[in-house]
Amino acid sequence: MSSVRRFLRRHLRGAVGGALFAAVLACAALAPWIVPHPPGEQQLLGRLRPPAWAARGDRAHLLGTDHLGRDLASRILFGARTSLLIAGSGVMVAGLVGVTLGIVAGYRGGAADLVLMRLVDVVLAFPALLLAIALLAAFRPSAASVVGVLTVTGWVTYCRIVRGQILVLKQEDFVVAVHALGGTDRRLVIHHLLPNLVPVILVIATIQLAQFILAESALSFLGLGVPPAVPSWGGMINEGRDYIWNAWWIETFPGLAIVWTVSGIGLLGDWLRDLIDPRLRV
């Protein structure tokens, strides 16, 4: 028990953030087996039921029902799958594109660096959410469209920061040593530069995952995200705004799910950054 207490004192943020995020991942993964009702099942005679512990609440609907009689708890659990799938896919694609282009810009330099940095400046000149709205207005709402837009707005962060890190690492002695020993550029990048970039990439990815969850929720709230038939936290908040005074739970519980998830990811990301980067432990 003493060792557990010592671990929790030293890694409290990681423990709390990991527990919060693990709970969301577990709920999303197990949603098809643990939901009390199908998320799209409508029961108009049971619409706007309050949570089970409130007056007029029904124990069959723990968090109540929405304006169409759909079980709110089931839709929140399936909404977690939607948010995590879209945000996670966006982070992976944006990271792959941004890290690759950042390495090219920083390592090759010259015209490639100039063109890529000007492209980054152009993308950064537009507010990310405004750019996402403008792009999505031209496409049919779908998960693939949202992932594509998040990639367009998100790769620049990786590219710019990775480029800067590469410019610093190129001056290190181990790079000169690899070249002196006849190492190829590919070997240098894959086996020596990339491992040194992992802490930076990990920090960006965790921060961006939370940002993408918020962005997906905002786009779904505006009707530009996933189709209305797909459970989404932002879409649920949008549906509940007309009932805020007499059915507060329709907006409140999806909002709390977003806060829970983003807070867990933020705490976990801070802990991982401190744990992986030895410079922060000096």
Image (cartoon, rainbow, N blue to C red):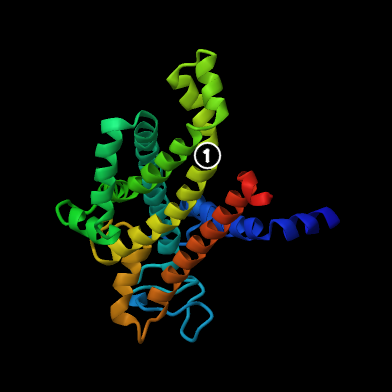
The quarter of the displayed image where residue 161 is located: top left
- The mark tally for this picture is 1
The quarter of the displayed image where residue 96 is located: top left
Residue reaching furthest to the left: 138
Q: Is residue 197 visible?
A: yes
Residue reaching furthest to the right: 2
Q: Is residue 115 left or right of residue 159?
A: left
**Quadrant (top left, top right, bottom left, bottom right) of the N terminus:** bottom right
The residue tagged with tag 1: helix, strand or loop? helix
Image vertical order of residue 116 relative to residue 189, above or below: below
Write the residue at 69% across / 50% down: 282
Q: Is residue 257 left or right of residue 155?
A: right
Residue reaching furthest to the top: 182
Q: Is residue 68 visible?
A: no
Q: Is residue 262 left or right of residue 141?
A: right
Write the residue at 44% across / 53% down: 209
Write the residue at 46% across / 84% down: 56
State the image coordinates of residue 46 (x, y, percent, origin top left): 37, 76
- For disc 1, the marked residue is 198
State the image coordinates of residue 187 (x, y, percent, origin top left): 48, 20
State the image coordinates of residue 260 (x, y, percent, origin top left): 51, 65
Write the residue at 75% across / 54% down: 7
Assess disc 1: are there few (<14), some (14-19) or many (≥20) residues with their C-alpha within 10 Å of its C-alpha: some
Image vertical order of residue 19 relative to residue 196, above or below: below
Image vertical order of residue 179 relative to residue 151, above or below: above
State the image coordinates of residue 124 (x, y, percent, origin top left): 28, 53
Q: Is residue 240 left or right of residue 264?
A: left
Residue type, label 1:
Val
Q: Observer-nearest residue: 37 or 229?
A: 229
